[in-house]
Image: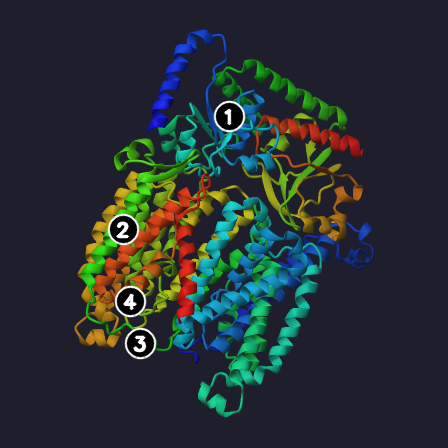
Amino acid sequence: MATAEAIRPRALPLGGIALLCGAIVLAGYNAASFGDPATLFQAWRQPDSAPIGTIQFLHAWLPRLMMSLLAGAGLALAGTVMQQVLRNPIASPLTLGVAAGSQLALSILTLTAPALLAPFGEAAAVAGGAIALAIVLGLTWHRGLEPVSVVLAGLVVSLYFGAVNAGLLLFFEFDLKALLIWGGGALTQHDWSGVTFLAPRVLVVLVFLGLLARPLAILTLDDHSARGLGLSLQRARLLALAAAVYLAAAIVSAVGIIAFVGLAAPALARQLGARTIGQRLLAAPAIGALLLFVTDQCVQQLDTFTTGLLPTGAVTALLGAPLLLWLLRQVRPRAAPMQTATVPHPGTHGPGRVAALWLVALAITVFALVLGRDATGWRLEGVFTILDSSPWRAPRVMGAACAGLLLALAGTVLQRLLRNPMASPEVLGISGGALAGVMILVLALPAAGEPALVAAGTAGALVTTGGLLWFSRHGGGAPERILLAGIAIKAIYDGLIGIVAASGSPLWLRLLNWVSGSTYGVDWPLVMGAAGVVALIGPAMLAFHRWLELLGLGAEAAGARGVSVNFAHLVLLTLAALATAVATLLVGPLSFVGLMAPHMARMLGLRRARAQLIGAAGIGVIVMVIADWAGRTLLVPQEWPAGLAAAFIGGLYFMWLLRRS
Amino acid sequence: MSLRTTAIALVACLLACAPLSAARQTAERVAVLNWGLAQTLVALGVEPVAVADVDGYRKWVSRPALPEDAVDVGRRIEPNLDVLSGTRPDLILMSGYYNRARERLRTIASTETLRIYDPEGEGDALERSLDIAQRLADRLDRGAAMERLRRDLDRAVAGLRARTEAGDSVYVIRFQDDGHVQVFGAPGLFDAVLQRAGLTNAWQGGANYWGFSMIPIERLDQAADHLVVVEPIPRRAERMMADSAIWQALPAVRAGDVHRLETIWSFGGVPSAIHFADRLGTAIDGDG
């Protein structure tokens, strides 16, 4: 974890002090707006007669200030511990899925037993966070908790939990609306209860971790040496991790999701020269508190200009993304262990199975076209009469099929490029970029029509793809760097969603529908465009199957066999990105088909690149068409978006994957 | 297939019977995908055959009551087209905001887009609601019902005016969570009712085109004669109202004039305005 980049030693501390001074001035300015400070003491003693301005200062502004300091410190503390225990410079409550798990647990509790929120909210959040982390660790255990895999798994888990949350919001919008503001990370307080909740917890965990400082320091040695020192590694690790999860969950239950502080503060502490764990346990919380304090003061100024709320957590996401990219340029993940399937068996019944797969895909597509349901019950119609009686159905089915195909292709390419079975198109962040484009358009022009939205989505996807390619242009040797760009983009996108959600406007529901991936708006022009892209990308990827085979052996091996690694990397990534962008416009960002389909193809014995590509494409079609059909017909008249339905199937697949490993 | 033939047969019968029913009002089958339009239709005496999210309407709008046999076509944002076409509507009404499928709706029946809440609209929500109600009355031949609706509105507003002091300032809010509220302002429906009744809206901080602004409770800091809370009130907000120093320091709360209103749909049309005016008058008058 040595810092590779040379930062001028004085620049950061000086910058930090300047920032602190600026923040204090801003805070003073904010505070002054509340009126005469002389009345403070009187107002505290006798609130009944004090002017409203002074009461606001004492019971809203001050608690908010304290909360920003506490939450910032707590998140930084949790992040430091997670990074230390997992030996992973990009671990944090957000990237490990802990925050998403807590949020989902609270949503479920709010829906099922709102009366229990007050006593059991914190416990539910902790349970949710712990479960999420357990899933992440379980998925990557057999790879030795390798940092990139862990963060990939964390991303996938938080995306997945986010998808479930989106599904709940879609159907229970009124019951869950209270969670929208909180979810965006609004720090507004109206009494001191939040501070009295969080302060003791932060202090207790800080003391606890201080006691664990020596065992934690030893964790930087490899397992062998540490065991030699007579320490029960596992126990110390688990204790520290449990404390970190507890603190992160407590913060989430108090103020919602605040992005990046838990990631940036420990990284900044390292940059500033804090080396030992003891130093970092002190420096990181201080920096975290400062970061969140500054952001919150700025947000308070901005808030007066907007008719909606500006939740601080969402703003930290928007600000944090470029910071993240800057800080983590130097991340050099450990060399990934070889995938088990890098030396493929020669094709096992390849052509036969692929053909069978595609026959099934065709049959299912026809089935989805002809079997429908309306108020009177199930109806079976002929393939051609469908175009007359339910003309809206065919483009949706074909759109779902194209999307499934494209996502499966993109997923296969990515898993081979990154040599990691957890890689999937969602992780790239392109889908997030497409949706960010849509969101920006809807925020600026609420009356925009459908074609404008599609154009905005395409523009967003293209911009993101361009950025991704630029960021990883030298990535042939370390393809995992794409991950960081993906995390940053996802964070920006989450921030935008948080802002729209907190504004409370009904606009939110419209965006939520886009996010959930409904094929409702898919019409023939869109399907034709998608089919055109399939016709372009499919054969192109097949033509490069040799590259895919060789890149799976590692950069050096591929280079030795005559593959121009950087160029191949760039071309394949471009194809995958385009496929993802188009698929997102059809079924949204969250279907996980791109994760499942390559796995399933491999399990069917299709291990050579070409066979895996075609097989995965067939599986992608099957999964997506079934998901779309199920969403349209099983809950009539409600409709479940195709993307969410596919994510649900993907979730079941995950559990199975976990048990297997 | 058979359903189609049956439908054609029915239409043929209706056409055959038409001369006999020339004196009757048009019995158009109307499907409506927006709650504000749905309540306007029912108030005009039209029974919609299909409504989006019937359960939601019954819970959040409730008045006037939908016909028992109204078919639920699914969520407002994505009505199920198979179910909708199965109800054989002659006219589909939508607000143009939620729905991505305008073109597809046109293949089922003639579709009209009527926006009460329009980012580019002129006038306030009540004016647009009246305008839209008039258009619907003209289209569906319900002139008499429209006159009754206007008179009801005038009566409700006059009643509100009579029960309150002219120029009284009022905050109208709904809790989002325990620390944030939607405060209603111009150009929304509630604000329009307040203005017509001679009351002042204590919130002058602007609002979106739906007529509300989302604020933390401490920004309700202007002096006001009445603070009106529209239900539902979350449990935590109830506790907050009892315990919070901020809440109790709000000028309106200190003056003691906090009223509660039952659930009233804040994004509706003329019937919601009437509902609001009636209930507000009762609340202010009844509580002193």
Q: CA distance from mark 3 to mark 2?
A: 33 Å
**Of callouts 3 and 4, which one flags the residue occurring earlier in the amino acid sequence?**
3
A513 sits left or right of B238 in the view: left
Q: Nearer the viewer, mark 1 or mark 2?
A: 2
Q: Amino acid at mark 1?
A: Pro
Q: Which residue is mark 1?
A: B48
Could you say where residue B259 lies in the image, as x and y percent from the top left?
74, 38
Residue drawn where x is 46% and y is 19% of the image: B28
Q: Amino acid at mark 3?
A: Met
Q: Which residue is mark 2?
A: A361
Q: Amino acid at mark 2?
A: Ala
Q: CA distance from mark 3 to mark 4?
A: 13 Å
Q: CA distance from mark 4 to mark 1?
A: 57 Å
Give the secondary structure at mark 2: helix
Dot 3 falls on which chain?
Answer: A
Mark 4 on the same chain as mark 2: yes
A347 sits left or right of A109 in the view: left
Mark 3 on the same chain as mark 2: yes
